[in-house]
Image: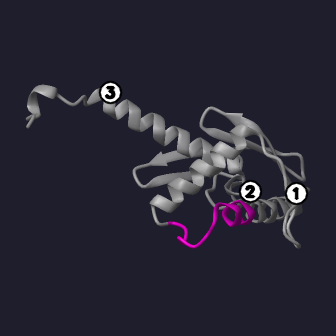
Protein backbone atom coordinates (compact mmCIF):
# COMPACT_ATOMS: atom_id res chain seq x y z
CA UNK A 1 0.00 0.00 0.00
CA UNK A 2 1.61 3.30 -1.06
CA UNK A 3 1.82 6.40 1.14
CA UNK A 4 -1.03 8.89 0.97
CA UNK A 5 -0.66 11.10 -2.12
CA UNK A 6 1.28 8.43 -4.00
CA UNK A 7 0.33 5.65 -6.40
CA UNK A 8 2.01 2.51 -7.63
CA UNK A 9 2.55 1.64 -11.29
CA UNK A 10 3.92 -1.50 -12.88
CA UNK A 11 6.79 -1.30 -15.37
CA UNK A 12 8.23 -3.99 -17.57
CA UNK A 13 11.59 -5.32 -16.40
CA UNK A 14 13.21 -3.75 -19.45
CA UNK A 15 11.73 -0.29 -18.77
CA UNK A 16 12.79 -0.51 -15.12
CA UNK A 17 16.36 -1.51 -16.07
CA UNK A 18 16.62 1.33 -18.60
CA UNK A 19 15.35 3.87 -16.08
CA UNK A 20 17.67 2.58 -13.33
CA UNK A 21 20.65 2.61 -15.72
CA UNK A 22 19.80 6.17 -16.79
CA UNK A 23 19.52 7.22 -13.14
CA UNK A 24 22.91 5.69 -12.26
CA UNK A 25 24.60 7.27 -15.29
CA UNK A 26 23.25 10.73 -14.45
CA UNK A 27 24.19 10.27 -10.78
CA UNK A 28 27.76 9.28 -11.64
CA UNK A 29 28.14 12.28 -13.95
CA UNK A 30 26.76 14.58 -11.24
CA UNK A 31 23.84 15.64 -13.41
CA UNK A 32 21.32 15.04 -10.66
CA UNK A 33 21.48 15.92 -6.99
CA UNK A 34 22.58 13.16 -4.64
CA UNK A 35 19.46 13.65 -2.51
CA UNK A 36 17.10 12.74 -5.40
CA UNK A 37 15.82 9.19 -5.02
CA UNK A 38 15.24 6.86 -7.93
CA UNK A 39 11.48 7.19 -7.37
CA UNK A 40 11.63 10.99 -7.51
CA UNK A 41 13.89 10.81 -10.59
CA UNK A 42 11.37 8.61 -12.44
CA UNK A 43 8.49 10.86 -11.36
CA UNK A 44 10.28 13.97 -12.69
CA UNK A 45 11.21 12.13 -15.89
CA UNK A 46 7.57 11.18 -16.43
CA UNK A 47 6.40 14.73 -15.70
CA UNK A 48 8.87 16.16 -18.27
CA UNK A 49 7.77 13.58 -20.85
CA UNK A 50 4.12 14.49 -20.27
CA UNK A 51 4.89 18.21 -20.57
CA UNK A 52 6.79 17.61 -23.83
CA UNK A 53 3.96 15.46 -25.15
CA UNK A 54 1.47 18.18 -24.24
CA UNK A 55 3.50 20.83 -26.07
CA UNK A 56 3.92 18.64 -29.15
CA UNK A 57 0.17 17.88 -29.11
CA UNK A 58 -0.52 21.61 -29.39
CA UNK A 59 1.53 21.97 -32.57
CA UNK A 60 0.73 18.56 -34.08
CA UNK A 61 -2.40 19.88 -35.80
CA UNK A 62 -0.01 22.18 -37.70
CA UNK A 63 2.73 19.62 -38.39
CA UNK A 64 3.08 15.87 -38.45
CA UNK A 65 6.13 13.66 -38.75
CA UNK A 66 5.71 11.23 -41.64
CA UNK A 67 8.93 9.34 -41.00
CA UNK A 68 12.66 9.31 -41.48
CA UNK A 69 14.65 8.84 -44.64
CA UNK A 70 18.43 8.39 -44.55
CA UNK A 71 19.70 11.52 -42.76
CA UNK A 72 16.35 13.33 -42.93
CA UNK A 73 13.07 13.73 -41.11
CA UNK A 74 10.04 14.02 -43.38
CA UNK A 75 7.20 16.23 -42.12
CA UNK A 76 3.95 17.56 -43.50
CA UNK A 77 2.33 20.86 -42.60
CA UNK A 78 -1.28 22.09 -42.45
CA UNK A 79 -1.07 22.93 -46.18
CA UNK A 80 -0.27 19.25 -46.83
CA UNK A 81 3.15 20.20 -48.15
CA UNK A 82 5.73 17.51 -47.56
CA UNK A 83 9.07 18.84 -46.37
CA UNK A 84 12.33 16.96 -46.06
CA UNK A 85 14.41 18.29 -43.18
CA UNK A 86 18.02 17.19 -43.64
CA UNK A 87 20.27 16.50 -40.67
CA UNK A 88 23.74 17.85 -41.46
CA UNK A 89 26.48 16.65 -39.15
CA UNK A 90 29.23 19.07 -38.16
CA UNK A 91 32.19 18.67 -35.81
CA UNK A 92 30.35 20.43 -32.99
CA UNK A 93 26.87 19.04 -33.50
CA UNK A 94 24.13 18.71 -36.03
CA UNK A 95 22.22 21.31 -38.01
CA UNK A 96 18.88 21.01 -39.73
CA UNK A 97 18.00 22.32 -43.18
CA UNK A 98 14.59 22.33 -44.88
CA UNK A 99 14.83 21.29 -48.53
CA UNK A 100 11.34 22.63 -49.30
CA UNK A 101 11.94 26.15 -47.96
CA UNK A 102 15.71 26.11 -48.58
CA UNK A 103 16.21 27.48 -45.06
CA UNK A 104 17.56 26.39 -41.70
CA UNK A 105 15.10 28.48 -39.70
CA UNK A 106 11.64 27.67 -41.06
CA UNK A 107 8.72 26.16 -39.15
CA UNK A 108 9.44 22.67 -40.56
CA UNK A 109 12.89 22.79 -38.99
CA UNK A 110 11.42 24.04 -35.72
CA UNK A 111 9.01 21.11 -35.65
CA UNK A 112 11.80 18.63 -36.47
CA UNK A 113 13.73 19.94 -33.44
CA UNK A 114 10.74 19.02 -31.26
CA UNK A 115 10.77 15.33 -32.25
CA UNK A 116 12.53 12.89 -29.92
CA UNK A 117 13.50 10.79 -32.94
CA UNK A 118 15.87 13.57 -34.04
CA UNK A 119 17.91 13.30 -30.86
CA UNK A 120 17.86 9.50 -30.91
CA UNK A 121 19.10 9.56 -34.51
CA UNK A 122 21.87 12.06 -33.71
CA UNK A 123 22.97 9.97 -30.74
CA UNK A 124 23.08 6.76 -32.80
CA UNK A 125 24.91 8.49 -35.65
CA UNK A 126 27.55 9.88 -33.26
CA UNK A 127 27.97 6.45 -31.70
CA UNK A 128 28.49 4.80 -35.10
CA UNK A 129 30.96 7.54 -36.12
CA UNK A 130 32.93 6.98 -32.90
CA UNK A 131 33.05 3.23 -33.57
CA UNK A 132 34.20 3.85 -37.15
CA UNK A 133 37.01 6.13 -35.90
CA UNK A 134 38.18 3.46 -33.46
CA UNK A 135 38.27 0.87 -36.23
CA UNK A 136 40.35 3.18 -38.45
CA UNK A 137 42.77 4.00 -35.64
CA UNK A 138 43.29 0.79 -33.69
CA UNK A 139 45.41 0.90 -30.56
CA UNK A 140 48.73 -0.80 -31.15
CA UNK A 141 49.39 -3.02 -28.18
CA UNK A 142 53.12 -3.15 -28.94
CA UNK A 143 53.28 0.60 -28.33
CA UNK A 144 51.92 0.23 -24.80
CA UNK A 145 54.18 -0.54 -21.91
CA UNK A 146 52.97 -3.04 -19.37
CA UNK A 147 54.07 -2.66 -15.76
Instruction: Tell me if label 1 and label 2 are in contact, CB under 8 Å.
Output: yes
Residue 107 seen in the figure: yes
Q: Could you tell me which quadrant the C terminus lies in?
A: top left
Considering only vertical position in the picture, is 115 above or below 126?
A: below
Q: Earlier in the sequence, mark 1 or mark 2?
A: 1
Q: At 90% from the left edge and 51% from the top edge, which residue is drawn?
A: 79
Q: Earlier in the sequence, mark 3 or mark 1?
A: 1
User: Element under label 3?
Assistant: helix
Residue 19 location (% of width, % of height): 65, 50
User: Element under label 1?
Assistant: loop
Q: At 88% from the left edge and 60% from the top edge, which residue is drawn?
A: 1
Furthest residue toward front: 1
Q: Which mark is residue 135?
A: 3
Q: Disc 1 marks which residue?
A: 62
Q: Which mark is residue 111?
A: 2
Residue 90 location (% of width, % of height): 44, 49
**Are there few (<14), some (14-19), or many (20+) residues within 10 Å of tag 1?**
some
Residue 12 location (% of width, % of height): 77, 40
Residue 140 location (% of width, % of height): 16, 28
Instruction: Tell me if label 3 and label 1 are in contact, CB under 8 Å.
Output: no
Q: Nearer the viewer, mark 2 or mark 3?
A: 3
- Inter-mark Cα distance, 3 to 1: 44 Å
Q: Earlier in the sequence, mark 2 or mark 3?
A: 2
Q: Quadrant of residue 137?
A: top left
Q: What residue range appears in magenta?
A: 31-44
Membership of 34 in magenta stretch: yes
**Are there few (<14), some (14-19), or many (20+) residues within 10 Å of tag 3?**
few
Q: At 39% from the left edge and 38% from the top edge, which residue is drawn?
A: 130
Amino acid sequence: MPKEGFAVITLTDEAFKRAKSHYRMKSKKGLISKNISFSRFVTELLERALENDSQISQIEPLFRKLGTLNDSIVVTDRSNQIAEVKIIFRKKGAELFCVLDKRADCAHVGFAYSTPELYQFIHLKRKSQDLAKRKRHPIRLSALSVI
